[in-house]
Image (cartoon, helix red, strand yellow):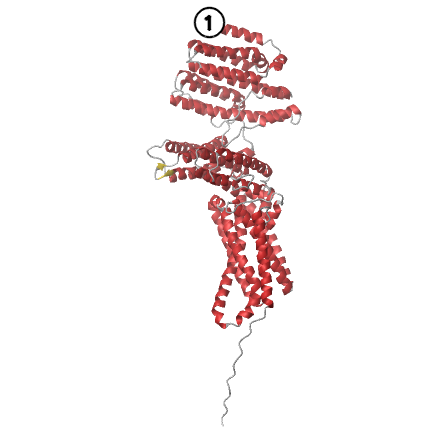
């Protein structure tokens, strides 16, 4: 009976070949027909052992779809693929008759990969003759790289074919893009199939092993022209034999003897070489993901015991992401240093075994120090192998890792582990702040407050992730905010595209230093201007001392940040808020003292009994001025350090220091001009100018500090919805459209103005009269 059915199938194929392609296209499309076949064959395999009649019916339906709808167009577009499909159908029919499940699974896989191969050939042929419409019809019959937390399916081939069809891209360019995308996809699928085959072999799953081996063979046939072009005909024939032996071994038993030959022929082969930008991006992913492995592992293991399974899984996931990036770059690394590259591969395998043991709760698990040592060894070797271009900071890799950390956050939320979710959120924010944010501030500043709001506490209309995690919000709400954050991150990433050139990085550094330096100069100038008369001049020295101390501490912060940049970045906003609060408090005291000191000093001098208190007050003023000089400058220096460290990772130290020199030069020039003009101003006018300027500085400092505190959740946020302020007003003047910021700035202004009028009132108040001196009475003598 099976033979009769197979004969009918062959006849149907011959008849189907006579169907014109135009009539076929009007009825259905190759991808639709192929997908129907795929579903029918999968159902046949599911029913293979439990319901042979159902399996036979499903198989017959798949054969009919192929014969009626797909055989003729495939024969016309890719005859070799059509021949292979026909042979695989015959093998599948025989397997059904013999009740050989592994053989059927292998034949089913061969049918599918032959259809993929035929589609690829059809697209290539169509583009070579400039037929974009036919390429569009066949292209959807394809596979994509599996979406992971580290990579997303590409659309390069689709966009290229659409461009060729619309005339916006030349067929030659479209063909190159299609080949790069498809070959990269099928090589990734080949690697996955080999991994699956090895795993199934170890578990004794015969059908799964046979299917995976057949898939690997089919994927290689798609890649074979590229392999032949790179290594020659003899090597290609040897590789084909190795894959044929693997598929045959999978049908009859273990593949342990056949798999090494396949791995050997694939060693160093990459069908679609990565372009320079992709190489840098994968290298950035490799280093970023690798650095996170010991961080996650140390959180999940304590005293030799696994305490948090989720952290171990995350460590494994980051290791897998790093290993995937390493695999993509391995061929290029082997060309540079084969011995060290092989050592890295061995260390990755060892790291995988250590993590697997922890995941399985083995009796002995690796200490966090051992994982850290393994990662450091890999990192050192990679630094010795990688070219300098790969080791430059890449914003695209940062955005990939941010997405991965946010995925980790959602995984923890799903497990109701909100503390771990918060840790993942902080990791994502730390990477943003220590990497892309420096460029955003200069090239796309409008994204910074939006991203910070979504990462932290948001507002009434869109709560931020920190707020939602703090209140244990449901996963659906967190997902909504995550989606909004993803959109903003994607837009920010697009805005930063193309700003990696050394000139752009140096300009970035110069602008950052000049902006922060200008704020520091203006603050110092206003304070110095208020202390230029009489005995007040002695209080200028502690301001300079405080400023000098801040400069020294800023340099030390730079050196410290070189070692623990991510840790500093994580707490950067909070540290900035604390420093700013201190600066505001001291500035308020100094403002009050400035307005009153010149009126009180004479009055106080009449009371000798307060001499000790006056001396104490001077000492307090001295210390307060040192603190003010320090905090006013260091708050700018702290921001500058973080931003410049990020730029060092982006390019190199020399490029950044060149920009720093330009920024410092411009700041110094402005500073000299400010202080030169200041010395020529009349005393009374200078008092008025500096008093006003101190008030402006205070308002700016209050506004920016309130904004920072709102970002990190130390203050509530109530936006003024009818007020829209441009971003530069917040950057330069601390003006943000929130009720808290505006009200507190008004309160600070009232304090300054009130302090002035209080001083004026005291100035015009009659001085207290000293008691009359009683003259001794003269005693007359006779």
Residue sitting at the far left: 363
Relative placement, left or right, of 48 versus 78 is left
Callout 1: few (<14), some (14-19), or many (20+) C-alpha neighbours within 10 Å? few
Whole-percent x, y for residue 183 in the image: 54, 25
Q: Quadrant of residue 181?
A: top right
Residue for badge 1: 1
Whole-percent x, y for residue 57 in the image: 48, 10
Whole-percent x, y for residue 17 in the image: 58, 9
Relative placement, left or right, of 198 versus 701 is left
Q: Is residue 602 above or below residue 750?
A: below
Asked if residue 499 shows in the view, the reply is: yes
Residue closest to the eye, 647 or 242: 647
Whole-percent x, y for residue 108 in the image: 48, 16
Q: Is residue 435 above or below residue 769?
A: above
Residue sitting at the far bottom: 782
Residue sitting at the far right: 167
Residue closest to the eye, 701 or 400: 701
Relative placement, left or right, of 353 versus 155 is left
Number of numbered discs visible in the structure rendering: 1
Q: Is residue 130 above or below residue 59?
A: below
Q: Is residue 628 above or below residue 613?
A: above
């Amino acid at each position: 009976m099976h033979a009769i059915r197979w004969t009918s199938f062959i006849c149907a194929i011959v008849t189907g070949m006579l169907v014109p392609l135009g009539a076929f296209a009007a009825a259905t499309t190759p991808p639709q027909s192929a997908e129907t076949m795929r579903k029918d064959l999968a159902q046949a395999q599911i029913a293979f052992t439990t319901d042979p009649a159902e399996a036979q019916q499903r198989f017959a339906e798949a054969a009919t779809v192929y014969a009626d709808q797909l055989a003729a167009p495939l024969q016309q577009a890719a005859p070799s693929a059509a021949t292979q499909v026909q042979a695989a159908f015959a093998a599948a029919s025989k397997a059904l008759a013999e009740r050989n499940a592994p053989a059927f699974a292998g034949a089913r896989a061969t049918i599918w990969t032959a259809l993929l191969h035929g589609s690829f050939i059809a697209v290539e042929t169509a583009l070579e003759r400039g037929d974009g419409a036919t390429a569009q019809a066949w292209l959807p019959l394809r596979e994509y790289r599996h979406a992971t937390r580290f990579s997303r399916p590409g659309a390069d081939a689709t966009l290229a074919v659409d461009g060729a069809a619309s005339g916006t891209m030349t067929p030659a360019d479209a063909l190159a893009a299609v080949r790069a995308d498809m070959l990269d996809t099928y090589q990734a699928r080949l690697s996955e199939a080999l991994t699956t085959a090895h795993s199934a072999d170890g578990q004794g799953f015969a059908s799964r092993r046979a299917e995976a081996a057949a898939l690997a063979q089919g994927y290689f046939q798609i890649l074979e022209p590229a392999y032949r072009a790179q290594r020659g005909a003899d090597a290609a024939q040897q590789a084909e034999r190795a894959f044929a032996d693997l598929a045959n071994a999978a049908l009859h038993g273990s593949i342990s003897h056949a798999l090494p030959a396949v791995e050997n022929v694939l060693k160093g082969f990459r069908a679609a070489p990565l372009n320079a930008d992709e190489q840098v991006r994968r290298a950035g992913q490799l280093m970023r993901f690798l650095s996170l492995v010991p961080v996650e592992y140390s959180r999940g293991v304590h005293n030799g015991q696994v305490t948090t399974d989720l952290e171990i899984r995350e460590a494994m996931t980051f290791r897998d992401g790093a290993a995937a990036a390493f695999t993509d770059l391995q061929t290029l690394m082997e060309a540079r240093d084969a011995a060290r590259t092989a050592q890295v591969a061995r260390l990755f395998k060892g790291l995988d075994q250590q993590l697997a043991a922890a995941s399985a709760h083995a009796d002995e698990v690796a200490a966090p120090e051992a994982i850290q040592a393994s990662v450091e060894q890999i990192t050192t070797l990679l630094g010795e192998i990688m070219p300098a271009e790969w080791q430059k900071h890449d914003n695209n890799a940062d955005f990939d890792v941010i997405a991965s950390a946010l995925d980790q956050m959602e995984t923890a939320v799903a497990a109701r582990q909100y503390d771990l979710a918060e840790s993942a959120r902080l990791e994502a924010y730390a990477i943003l702040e220590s990497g892309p944010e420096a460029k955003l501030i200069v090239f796309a500043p409008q994204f910074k407050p939006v991203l910070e709001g979504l990462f932290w506490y948001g507002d009434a209309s869109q709560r931020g992730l920190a707020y939602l995690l703090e209140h244990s919000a449901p996963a659906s709400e967190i997902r909504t905010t995550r989606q909004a954050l993803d959109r903003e991150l994607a837009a920010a990433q697009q805005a930063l595209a193309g700003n990696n050139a050394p000139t752009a990085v140096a300009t970035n550094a110069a602008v950052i230093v000049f902006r922060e330096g200008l704020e520091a100069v203006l603050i110092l100038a206003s304070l110095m201007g208020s202390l230029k008369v009489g005995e007040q001049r002695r209080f200028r020295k502690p301001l300079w001392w405080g400023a000098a101390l801040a400069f020294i501490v800023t340099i030390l912060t730079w050196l410290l940040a070189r070692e623990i940049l991510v840790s500093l970045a994580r707490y950067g906003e909070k540290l900035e808020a604390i420093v700013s609060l201190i600066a505001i408090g001291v500035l308020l005291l100094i403002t009050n003292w400035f307005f009153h000191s010149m009126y009180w000093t004479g009055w106080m001098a009449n009371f000798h009994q307060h001499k000790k208190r006056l001396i104490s007050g001077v000492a307090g003023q001295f210390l307060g001025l040192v603190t003010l000089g320090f905090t006013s400058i260091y708050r700018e220096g702290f921001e500058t350090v973080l931003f410049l460290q990020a730029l060092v990772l982006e390019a190199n130290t020399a490029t950044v220091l060149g920009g720093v020199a330009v920024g410092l030069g411009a700041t110094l020039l402005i500073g000299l001009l400010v202080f030169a003009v200041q010395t020529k101003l009349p005393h009374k006018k200078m008092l008025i100018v500096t008093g006003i300027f101190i008030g402006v500085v205070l308002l700016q400092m209050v506004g920016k500090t309130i904004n920072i505190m709102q970002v990190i959740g130390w203050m509530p946020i109530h936006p003024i919805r009818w007020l829209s302020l441009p971003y530069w007003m917040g950057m330069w003047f601390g003006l943000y459209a929130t009720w808290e910021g505006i009200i507190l700035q008004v309160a600070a202004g009232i304090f300054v103005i009130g302090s002035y009028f209080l001083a004026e009132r005291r100035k015009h108040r009659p001085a207290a009269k000293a008691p009359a001196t009683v003259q001794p009475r003269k005693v007359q003598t006779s």
